[in-house]
Image: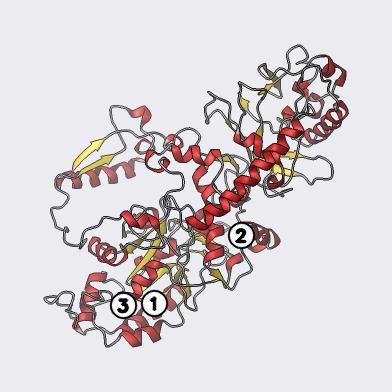
């Protein structure tokens, strides 16, 4: 028979569960002052009073219909070493799979009603420990990787989560006065408002820390591999992890004792190292001697990019907090950090056009991490294949299509990140992704280390690589005719697009190889307009017969799943003459029509006169030459031919991607 978890524990005479920490609730259950059923009913009543009515916090997206039944079955079981959470009601973020009647939706209308084949590993651990899964908490849709500038806590399925300390909304669009933090918004708000004993959230980059800080809670962002990721609807496997939301540090340690375990479904957990008991090291003087970094150096004010922006009242609060830490014996280390845009290093972000209709920065370029966007498609497709049931949605492309078909409800803030992610290959084979991973020494050792479902994915990746080599051969054949053709369409079928994406200009930094293009419309043949969210250079080798090529990262009505622009150019092949100058002329005309749609101060149509094909026949292109053409107050860097630069090639489709602008 299991021993009581704390034999000397005495629960307070009048425990109020909505304000009590998890450790006291466990003691009350162990001492018989509470039952699982009574505790569950208490939380359900508060959810009805404060989450559904009253301030309508909207933190709980769905109640587990079996919660009371499960609680009744556990009533006779007391918390013990074997089942430390017996009878404790816990909420899960709605991107953590449960194999019961509860849907797992990530807050998306596209996944409404979608269920999971099985419990996520951490859910199994919670059930084995005796926890009552109370329901699913609301969240920022798809862990805040759907749209640029989406308010934290908003999802198309669950609506807007409110901060319990300031639940008011402002403006006609109902934006919170005080953000609840995201993406684990509902998980944090529910604990802060006393709607559950504790909750589980997830984080890729700040999704535990941010909401915990805005709701006065304690959380732990575990190292990847400490908690299993299996069964968590993913954003990026290289950084995804789950974590506890609690009222005290001891509560967080109690949950880590249950959740930190090796899992054969997650290879990252196989090298896990953890103490036998996370609560053993807790003490009132534990902070003594701890080195705590503060990203603010008074001796370097010009580089104080974090604390230097704080208002005086906030500076006072932070100063008082730091003083408390010093009084407790902490060693404060002050040092400025790089600006957020350089934390990952050059080449680690991707240009995505912000088309969020409610964003104050609409029309500007957002720069999410490359790793997030590339892993999002790869990992989400695997989850939908291996875990999701009761849904017709099988890929990220299906979600994009559903959202477009239901834009009135599903796309209040757009889906720019999903559009950009959907145009990646989805197999993590791109050099842009591998280069971004290599910027982190720990991750760069193996660009696919710890990837879930690796064996099956590796097999599919091998097939795709074979297809890619075949496509490259097709691309080289098209070059032998002297012209690189312009294509807009499905990148999976365009060999030349893959070829250009695989060759990088030697010596060219990845940061310089990135470009930002906005509001660009291109028409060619019978293709529909394509709005380019940004353009990213993938330059080919300068030592061989190659100039630059542009790969557009697009968000808009797409002609295919991967919009790619291959720059038109002609070259000399010994004594062989150019046989397709008529095609070049037709493409120049198509370029001229496309540029006519660009608004000022972008390039006007008259800057691209009719192509002089005769000049092209006389003078072949030399890819090593460069020139800058001034137009509409900006300069566009491009490749050009030698003698005929002012008449021929610079006026062709080099303008298509508006690739590299400098003031």
Residue 639 in the image: state x and y as whole percent. Answer: 68, 21
Which element type, helix, strand or loop, lies under badge 2?
loop
Q: Are marks 2 and 1 in contact (CB under 8 Å)?
A: no
Q: Which corner quadrant of the image does residue 259 belong to?
A: bottom left
Residue at position x 28%, y 30% in the image: 298
Question: In the figure, is residue 571 to the left or right of 9?
Answer: right
Residue marked by disc 1: 46
Going from N to C along the chain, the mark reached first, 2 or 1, is: 1
Q: Can you say whether 405 is above or below 576 in the image?
A: below
Which element type, helix, strand or loop, lies under badge 3?
loop
Residue marked by disc 3: 130
Which element type, helix, strand or loop, lies under badge 1?
helix
Q: Nearer the viewer, residue 516 or 495?
A: 495
Residue at position x 31%, y 56% in the image: 220
- Label 1 and label 3: CA atoms lie apart by 22 Å
Residue 26 in the image: state x and y as whole percent. Answer: 24, 75
Q: Quadrant of the N terminus?
A: bottom left
- Label 2 and label 1: CA atoms lie apart by 38 Å
């Amino acid at each position: 028979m299991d021993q009581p978890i704390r034999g000397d524990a005495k629960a307070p005479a009048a425990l109020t569960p909505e304000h009590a920490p998890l450790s006291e609730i466990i003691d009350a259950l162990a001492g018989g002052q509470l039952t699982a059923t009574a505790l569950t009913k208490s939380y359900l009543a508060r959810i009805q009073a404060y989450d559904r009515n009253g301030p309508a916090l909207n933190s709980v997206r769905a109640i587990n219909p079996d919660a009371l039944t499960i609680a009744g079955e556990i009533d006779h079981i007391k918390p013990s070493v074997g089942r430390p959470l017996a009878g404790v009601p816990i909420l899960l973020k709605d991107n953590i799979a449960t194999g019961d009647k509860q849907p797992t939706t990530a807050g998306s209308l596209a996944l409404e009603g979608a269920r999971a084949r099985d419990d996520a590993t951490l859910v199994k651990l919670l059930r084995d420990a005796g926890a009552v899964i109370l329901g699913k908490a609301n969240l920022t849709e798809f862990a805040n990787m759907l749209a640029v500038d989406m308010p934290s806590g908003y999802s198309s399925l669950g609506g807007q989560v409110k901060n319990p300390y300031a639940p008011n909304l402002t403006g006609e669009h109902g934006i919170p006065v005080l953000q609840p933090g995201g993406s684990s918004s509902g998980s944090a708000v529910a604990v802060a408002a006393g709607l559950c004993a504790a909750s589980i959230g997830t984080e890729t980059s700040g999704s535990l820390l941010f909401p915990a800080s805005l709701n006065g809670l304690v959380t732990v962002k575990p190292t990847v591999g400490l908690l299993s990721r299996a069964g968590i609807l993913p954003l990026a496997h290289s950084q995804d992890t789950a974590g506890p939301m609690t009222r005290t540090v001891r509560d967080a340690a109690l949950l880590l004792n249950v959740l930190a375990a090796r899992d054969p479904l997650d290879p990252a957990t196989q090298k896990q190292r953890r103490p036998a008991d996370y609560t053993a090291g807790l003490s009132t003087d534990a902070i003594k001697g701890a080195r705590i970094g503060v990203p603010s150096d008074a001796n370097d004010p010009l580089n104080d990019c974090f604390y230097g922006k704080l208002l005086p009242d906030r500076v006072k609060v932070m100063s008082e907090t730091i003083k408390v830490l010093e009084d407790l014996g902490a060693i404060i280390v002050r040092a400025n950090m790089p600006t957020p845009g350089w934390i990952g290093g050059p080449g680690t972000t991707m240009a995505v056009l912000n088309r969020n209709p409610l964003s104050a920065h609409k029309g500007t370029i957002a720069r999410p991490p490359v790793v997030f966007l590339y892993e999002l498609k790869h990992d989400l497709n695997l989850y939908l294949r291996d875990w999701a049931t009761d849904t017709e949605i099988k890929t990220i492309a299906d979600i994009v299509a559903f959202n477009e078909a239901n834009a009135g409800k599903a796309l209040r803030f757009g889906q720019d990140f999903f559009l950009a992610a959907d145009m990646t290959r989805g197999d993590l084979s791109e050099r842009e992704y591998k280069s971004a991973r290599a910027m982190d020494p720990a991750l760069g050792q193996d660009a696919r280390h710890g990837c879930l479902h690796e064996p099956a994915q590796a097999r599919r990746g091998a097939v795709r690589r074979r297809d890619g080599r075949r496509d490259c051969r097709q691309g080289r054949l098209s070059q032998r005719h002297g012209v690189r053709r312009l294509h807009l369409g499905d990148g999976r079928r365009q060999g030349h697009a893959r070829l250009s994406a695989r060759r990088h200009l030697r010596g060219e930094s990845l940061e310089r190889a990135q470009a930002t293009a906005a509001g660009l419309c291109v028409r060619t043949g019978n293709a529909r307009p394509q709005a380019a969210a940004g353009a990213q250079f993938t330059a080919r080798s300068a030592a061989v017969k190659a100039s630059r090529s542009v790969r557009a990262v697009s968000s808009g009505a797409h002609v295919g799943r991967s919009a790619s622009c291959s720059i038109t150019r002609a070259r000399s092949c010994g004594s062989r003459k150019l046989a397709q100058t008529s095609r070049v002329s037709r493409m120049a005309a198509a370029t001229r029509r496309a540029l006519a749609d660009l608004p000022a101060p972008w390039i006007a149509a008259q800057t691209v006169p009719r192509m002089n094909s005769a000049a092209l026949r006389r003078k072949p292109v030399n890819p090593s030459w460069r020139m800058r053409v001034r137009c509409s107050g900006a300069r566009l860097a491009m490749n050009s031919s030698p003698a005929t630069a002012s008449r021929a090639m610079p006026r062709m489709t080099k303008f298509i991607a508006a690739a590299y602008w400098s003031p």
